[in-house]
Image: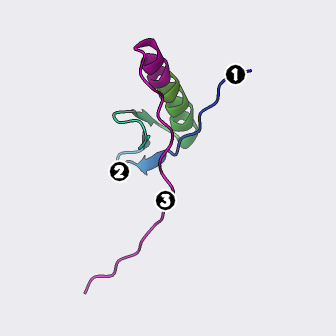
Amino acid sequence: MRERHDYTVVFEEEPEGGYTVIVPALPGCVTYGRTRAEARRMVKEAIGAYLQSLRKHGEAIPEDNVSSVESVAVGLG
């Protein structure tokens, strides 16, 4: 059976186009894709490489510690 890890990822739409994707539970795990679908594929690859590196160096694989993500509207003026 294959080991599975689930992580919350954040897609940030870039002004020049495309998406930057960060993984809050994995510091420094950041990638980019021209489309949302490409960004999703890229972040899966980035997470896999990150976890393989942790395992190779004998480090613990962190769990996703993001309990909720919300959008908050703030009015000015």
Circle 3: is it few (<14), some (14-19), or many (20+) Cα within 10 Å?
A: few
Left or right of 75, for residue 70: right
Q: What residue type is labelled 1?
A: Arg
Q: Give the mark nearest the N terminus, 1 or 2.
A: 1
Q: Are marks 3 and 2 in contact (CB under 8 Å)?
A: no
> Residue 67 location, x and y as percent?
51, 56
Helix, strand or loop at mark 1: loop
Q: Residue furthest right?
A: 1
Q: What residue type is labelled 2?
A: Pro
Q: Give the mark nearest the N terminus, 1 or 3.
A: 1
Q: Does residue 57 sit above or below 35 in this rendering?
A: above
Most common SS among magenta residues:
loop
Q: Name the residue under label 1.
A: 2
The Cα atoms of the two marked residues, 3 and 2, are separated by 22 Å
Q: Name the residue under label 3.
A: 69
The residue that appears at 41% across and 21% down in the rendered structure is 59
Q: Name the residue under label 2.
A: 15
The Cα atoms of the two marked residues, 1 and 2, are separated by 38 Å
The residue that appears at 33% across and 81% down in the rendered structure is 75
Which quarter of the figure is the N terminus placed in? top right
> Residue 36 location, x and y as percent?
54, 42
